[in-house]
Image (cartoon, helix red, strand yellow):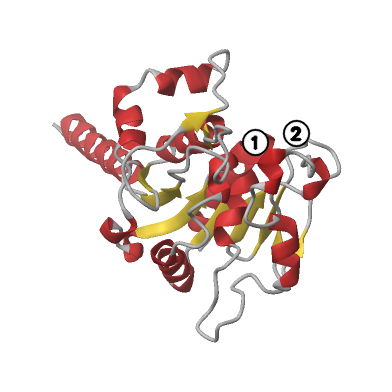
Amino acid sequence: MHKSILNIVFLFLLISCSSEQKNQGKILFVASNQHTYGKTNINASNHFSEIVLAYDIFVKNGYKVDFTSPEGGAIPIGYISTSDSIQKKYLYDNHFMNLLKHTKSPQEIKASDYKAIYYSGGGSAMFGVAENISIQNIATEIYKNDGVISTICHGTAGIVHLKNEQGLPLYQNKKLSGYPDLFENKSAQYYQAFPFSIEEIIKENRGNFIYSDKQSDDFSVVDGKFITGQDPSATVSVARKVINAIKND
C-alpha cells in the first residue's frame, strides 16, 4: 500500500514537471511580408534558418511561439538548406509551415502575453518592419514589461526606430549587433534599395554597434534585455541567451 502511494506521488510530480516544461510562456517572432528589395525586381525573403533554428530551441524549452508581420498572412522564405536536418524537418512540418502562411497581424497581438520578441533576418527584414508603428509599440511594451528584445542579422533593422517614453532611442548606450556594412556590397542594386544602413542609424541614435570582423563567427552580444546576433551563425546562441535571460528574470 505504501509503495502504491509513493508511485502515485511520483507520477503526479512527473506530470506536474512535464506540464510546467510545456508552459514556460510565449515568444513573438517578427518577420516581413516584402518579396523584393524595395521597388526593384530582385527577390527578397526571410531567412529560413534564422527562423527555424531559433524556433526549434524555443519550443523544445517549453515556449509557445507566435508569428507576426506588418500585413499578417504569408511571408516569403528563402536561404533554405535541406542538407540541414532541422531546416528539412520544419520545411515538411505542416503545422510550422502554416504558421508562416498565416502570420498574425500586429493588431491581433497582445504584447503583455509575451516574454520576448525576436526579429528574424533576411533581405526582407529591411522593409516594412522598422517603420510599422504597431510593431514598434508591441516591442516597446514587451521591453517595458521587463521582456527581452532580440534580433539576428538584418533583423536588427526592425528595432532601429524604437523609442522610450521620453522619445529617446530605446537602445541608447546599449551594445547591439547585426549585419555590418563591412560585409555588404554597397555598390550592388540590392544594397542601394535599402532604406537605411543598420550600422549607421544605430550609431546615429547613440547605440553602440559592435561586430566581429569575421563572417559566420557566431557573434552575439547581450546588453541588459537586448540580445542581438551578427549573422545566421549566431542564431542558436541568440535563442539560448534569450531563454537564459527569461529564466534569470
| Residue 203 left/right relative to 114 | right
Q: Amino acid at mark 2?
A: Ser
Find out whether the residues at labels 2 and 1 contact each other: C-beta distance under 8 Å.
yes
At mark 2, the secondary structure is loop
Residue 194, position as x, y percentages in the image: 64, 50
Residue 135 visible from this viewpoint: yes
Where is residue 157, by image quadrant?
Answer: bottom right
What is the count of numbered marks?
2
- The mark found on residue 43 in the picture is none
Residue lying farthest to the front in this orientation = 40
46 and 249: which is toward the camera? 46
Please tell me which residue is depicted at 36% across the width and 35% down the height of the picture: 100
Reading the image, the residue beneath label 2 is: 216
Residue 60, position as x, y percentages in the image: 43, 34
* Residue at mark 2 to residue at mark 1: CA–CA distance: 7 Å
Residue 1, position as x, y percentages in the image: 13, 31
- The mark found on residue 232 in the picture is 1
